[in-house]
Image: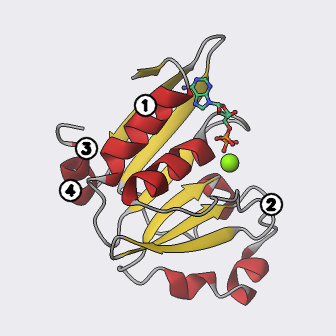
Amino acid sequence: MHLADENATLALAQRLAARLKPGMVIYLHGDLGAGKTTLVRGALDALGYKGRVKSPTYTLVEPYHIAGLDLRHFDLYRLQDEEEWDSAGFRDEFDGHNIFFIEWPEHAQGLLPQADVGIVFEILPQGRNVEIRGCTPAGLECLEQL
Ligand SMILES: Nc1ncnc2c1ncn2[C@@H]1O[C@H](COP(=O)(O)OP(=O)(O)O)[C@@H](O)[C@H]1O
Ligand SMILES: [Mg+2]
């Protein structure tokens, strides 16, 4: 899918937000500045979140409760190792109830549950390309008619 500008990214996020189900895990791949956080911000906006969506660059995770959903926005760019993961209590987060948007999932390999949906952003001279893939039955269902 080609996303010509930020508004196109936000529109995709809005459609995705309407299809989120508890327990869904969404991996967001792509270089710095590709649009991963923009997508999460768009999804939260679409769900009615009124506050500022901070990038969890240093905190690693920001929790949100909105529209009856518990969401966790992870940015694992700065995750050091498994010990940091454990001491932060992240293992307990994956309870099948929370919805996860995870930037830089490759930095926590072996620690994360499988993705239901994987989104890969590619930076182009103009806009972005994204590849969206359903990896589980729940993920495929989410992407139907997206
Ligand atoms: N489809 C798009 N085309 C061009 N620019 C975009 C698009 N989507 C988002 N952007 C811009 O690119 C930047 C992405 O930043 P951010 O979402 O923080 O990236 P990441 O979280 O992947 O590091 C923002 O400045 C945003 O306005
Ligand atoms: Mg980001």
Disc on the earlier residue, 2 or 1: 2
Which amino acid type is marked by label 4?
Answer: Pro
Tags 3 and 1 touching, CB below 8 Å: no
Mark 4 vs 1: CB contact within 8 A? no
Tell me if mark 1 has few (under 14), some (14-19) or many (20+) residues whose alpha carbon lies within 10 angstroms of its own: few
Q: CA distance from mark 4 to mark 1?
A: 18 Å
Q: Quadrant of the C terminus?
A: top left
Sequence-first tag of 4 and 1: 1
Characterize the local packing of mark 4: few (<14), some (14-19) or many (20 or more) Cα atoms within 10 angstroms: few
Measure the C-alpha gap from mark 4 to mark 2. 31 Å
Q: Would residue 25 appear left or right of 89 to someone viewing this image?
A: left
Count of residue discs: 4
Q: CA distance from mark 2 to mark 1?
A: 24 Å
Asked if one can make out residue 30 in the rendered structure from this viewpoint, the answer is yes
User: Alpha-carbon distance for marks 3 and 1?
Assistant: 12 Å
> Helix or strand or loop: what does disc 2 sit on?
loop
- Residue carrying label 4: 137
Relative image position of residue 139 (x, y in whole percent): 28, 53
Residue at the spot 52% in from the left edge and 44% down from the top edge: 39
Q: In the rendered structure, which amino acid carries the disc numbered 2?
A: Arg
The type of residue carrying mark 1 is Glu
Amino acid on which disc 3 is placed: Leu
Q: Is mark 2 within 8 Å of ligand 2?
A: no
Taking the image in four quarters, ligand 1 sits in the one at top right
Mark 2 vs 1: CB contact within 8 A: no
The kind of secondary structure element at disc 4 is: helix
The label nearer to you, 3 versus 4, is 3
- The residue at which mark 2 appears reads as 78
Image quadrant of residue 81?
bottom right
Of callouts 3 and 1, the N-terminal one: 1
**Position of residue 85 in the picture relative to residue 129 (left or right):** right
Where disc 3 sits, the SS reads helix
